[in-house]
Image (spheres, helix red, strand yellow):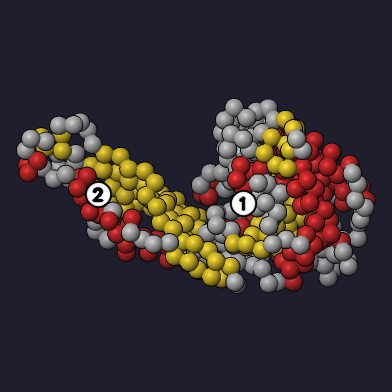
Amino acid sequence: MTESPDDARRLAARTLALVDIPSVSRDERRIAEVVEMAIPRGAFHEVYGDGEAFYFRTDRRPGRPLVLLAGHLDTVPPQGNLPGRIEDGQVIGLGATDMKGGVAVMIELAHWVDREAPDLHADLGLVFFTREELPVAESPLPALFAACPEIHAAELAVVLEPTDNTLQAGCVGNLNASLTFNGRSAHSARPWQGENAITRAVEGLADVVRVAPRAVEIEGLEFTEVLSVTRIEGGIADNVIPDRVHCRLNFRFAPDRDTDDAVRRLEDLIGDAGELEITSVSPSGRVTTRTPLAERLRAAGDFAVAPKQAWTPVAQFTMEGIDAVNLGPGATATAHTRDERVDIGELVRTYRALQRFLTENA
């Protein structure tokens, strides 16, 4: 493996080119076409592609583990941050951090494998997919997993979500729910003739807002489980006792809970105080830090190890029985912001660490 000063130039140019392709969730057709065409067919076979998810891999060789690199193609809506630009050693623009930079690293690694034919210690698979920024029910990954059973033989999946180049294990689950409190409307001059839904909401939410963060330690990493009221709507007019209040809840549950347990926890907490409806639930991700491949990856970049205090597709891979970790060049502090950006030096660091991970002592 050779380290070239051209790495930074190629990675920056690739990231900027991807940033400049509008790719808000559900409108990823153009970027999917570009990425599909960008993977060299000399070293990689396209095993699966349905326009929403793609799986490429090198030849399978007996005795070699299969390692997957995974990244999503979509972004949140723009905030006046298109087109992108390169400035002060950074690529700036929509999706630069989450996660066009990670996708650029994946594509450039594919070209490196094709160009230099390095002696890889593992067979390499590349998974690209759309609609990650939407509820998990819209994810195209389940169709990919069903169509390609060989993916389940992978010994490690590396999801290149932004992690500031730390190796982040697992992820918290994400449950969204609607909570409605019903009363009976009345004139505010005679409130005793009605039942104030706001009063019911204040009383019914008391236990929710008092739930303290729960610290959960797994493999020496501390996750924090939190429940929040994120929206509340109610009331008709200043002289009307309202008969309805609608709230939204967000439950970020620790990896020691599965989705059923998370739902039960919320149902037990609410009881009969209001009408609870679970609107979406994404599973937590199993923690994987102590396997030989995860340790090899950590050592390849001398990465710090941390818990993933957010949801990522690591959960979808671990639900399939595949060990998975988060590792990406993006800056978490700028993800989804108007000022989204990724440092070119961090792109290079991820790229070269993955080169070492795939080749050293092959």
What residue lies at 58% left-to-right and 53% top-to-bottom? 312
Give the residue at x 24% y 50%.
202
Residue nearest the viewer, comparing 202 with 193: 202
Using the image, determine if residue 276 lies above or below residue 222.
Answer: above
Q: In which quarter of the image is the N terminus?
A: bottom right
Residue furthest to the front: 88
Locate residue 361: give its quadrant. bottom right
Mark 2 or mark 1, earlier in chain: 1
Image coordinates of residue 97 in percent, x first then y, are 66, 43
For badge 2, the amino acid type reads Ala
- Determine whether, in the image, residue 281 is placed left or right of residue 341: left
Q: Which of 347 and 60 is in front in this view?
A: 347
Amino acid carrying label 1: it is Leu
Instruction: Tell me where residue 132 appears, x and y as whole percent.
Output: 59, 46
Quickly name the residue at label 2.
201
From what the image shows, is residue 344 above or below residue 176?
Answer: above
Real-space Cα distance between discs 2 and 1? 38 Å
* Image quadrant occupied by the C terminus: bottom right
How crowded pointer 1 is (Cα within 10 Å; few <14, some 14-19, many 20+) is rated as: many
Determine if residue 162 is in view.
Answer: yes
The reply to whether residue 155 is in sight is no
Point out residue 30 in the picture as x, y percentages from the top left corner: 69, 32
Q: Name the residue under label 1.
A: 141
